[in-house]
Image (spheres, rainbow, N blue to C red):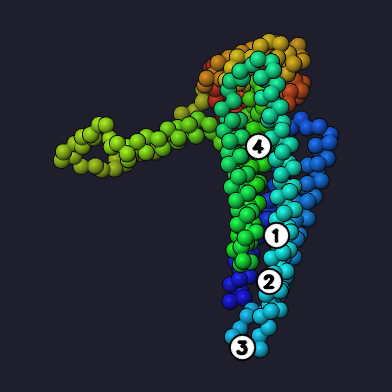
Amino acid sequence: MKSKITLILILVFIFFRGISQVPNDLNLEISGGDVKKIEKNKENFEEAQKIYKKAVSLYEAIPAPDTSKDFDYESYNEKVEEAMKMLLEGMEMYSAATDQVFSIYKDGANDFWEEQRKEGHVPIGLEKARYLELEAGIAYDKATVRKQFARESMDFLEAVSYVNQCNKLEAEALQNMGRALQIYQDFPVEYNYQWVDDINIEEIIAQKQAEREARNEKLFGKHKQEVKPQNEEIGIIEREPVEPEPIVGEVTYRVQIAAHTIKMEDSFIKQIYKGDREVSEIQEDNWYKYQIGNYKSFAEAQKQLEEANVARAFIVAYLEGEKINVKEARKIAP
């Protein structure tokens, strides 16, 4: 019985070993005072994890109850209560740290919208940031509910499960709120952030549309009856593998400094790139993209990338005017 409990605790708490509660893939502009608060709360997250481990160790050390008349249930309950108290102490410290960091991110987002309102602007192209902010709020509210469940639980293992769920949801809330703030601060530029587990807003919209259609179909039935061909057998046609055709043509490289779903003013481009190279604007995949140069080799483009000194700029490649993967391009024009 005890070994089974130990295994459960290990599985439940394995989440805490690798968690990075404060997102480390952001480049936010935050005031000095708030930076100090975030750094302090990073320490609080680590301290809370230590308290969790102490609570688990304390619980594991408690002898399992037996049916003998000599077993001291009063002492057993006191020790379980002590472990539970320590567990909840860690949870409160963890959540208090989350609250502070979340408030910093949320206030930053609110400041963005307030500034836009004062300027009379109606910013467009922020669907992804709005979605992330919404998801952050949902995760934060769910964490609050799990936290209350943990407080009300009378069973240590059950409380551990709720605490784990709470902290995981809090991490999700901070990640999404921080990413939303990053997009707001970079507006009207939207970069290729390459975040781990990043969402694709087009896929989200398509998924929501499919869900709505499925609900409507369930409620009202199909509007059109599908007609299936009669006496038609379905088989699998095996084809010989086709070798990819070699890439042939002239390859050029460019340095992309900015991109967005809306057209950017020249004055804003000059704030991003302060060099003397000409910046060209192209429309590609419903985006306005701003690029420097037409270089015959990757080395030339790499040199210009360094000279441009633009945060999160990157190199793109084209074959006869059509965009291709940089890795493939370098096979032709290293």
Type of the residue with mark 1: Leu
For marks 3 and 4, give the CA distance. 54 Å
Residue 96 in the image, given as x and y percentages of width and height: 73, 48
Determine which residue is flagged by label 2. Answer: 80
Which one is nearer the viewer's eye here, 224 or 235?
A: 224
User: What's the distance in space between the residues labelled 2 and 1, CA to CA?
Assistant: 12 Å
Count residues near mark 4 (Cα–Cα under 10 Å), then give few for <14, some for 14-19, many for 20+.
many
Label 2 crowd (10 A; few <14 / some 14-19 / many >=20): some
- Describe residue 193's horizontal placement relative to residue 222 as left or right: right
- In the displayed orientation, state which residue is furthest to the bottom: 69
Q: Give the mark nearer the N terminus: 3 vs 2.
A: 3
> What label sits on residue 88 in the rendered view?
1
In three-dimensional space, the C-alpha distance between marks 4 and 1, rounded to whole angstroms, equals 25 Å
Q: Nearer the viewer, mark 4 or mark 1?
A: 1
Residue 68 disc label = 3
Q: Residue at x 66, y 80 (%)?
A: 73
Q: Residue at x 70, y 59 (%)?
A: 88
The earlier-in-sequence mark between 4 and 2 is 2
Q: Earlier in the sequence, mark 4 or mark 1?
A: 1
Whether 289 is drawn above or below 165: the answer is above
Judged from the image, the secondary structure of the residue bearing numbered disc 2 is helix
Pinpoint residue 280: horizontal percent, then vertical percent: 64, 12
Amino acid type, label 2: Val
The amino acid type found where label 4 is placed reads Met
Q: Which residue is mark 4?
A: 177
Residue 125 at what x, y percent from top left? 58, 22
For the residue pair 121 and 148, the one nearer the viewer reads as 148
Residue 252 seen in the figure: no
Residue 18 lies, with reference to residue 305, above or below; the image says below
Q: Secondary structure at mark 3?
A: loop
Mark before the other along the chain sequence, 2 or 1: 2
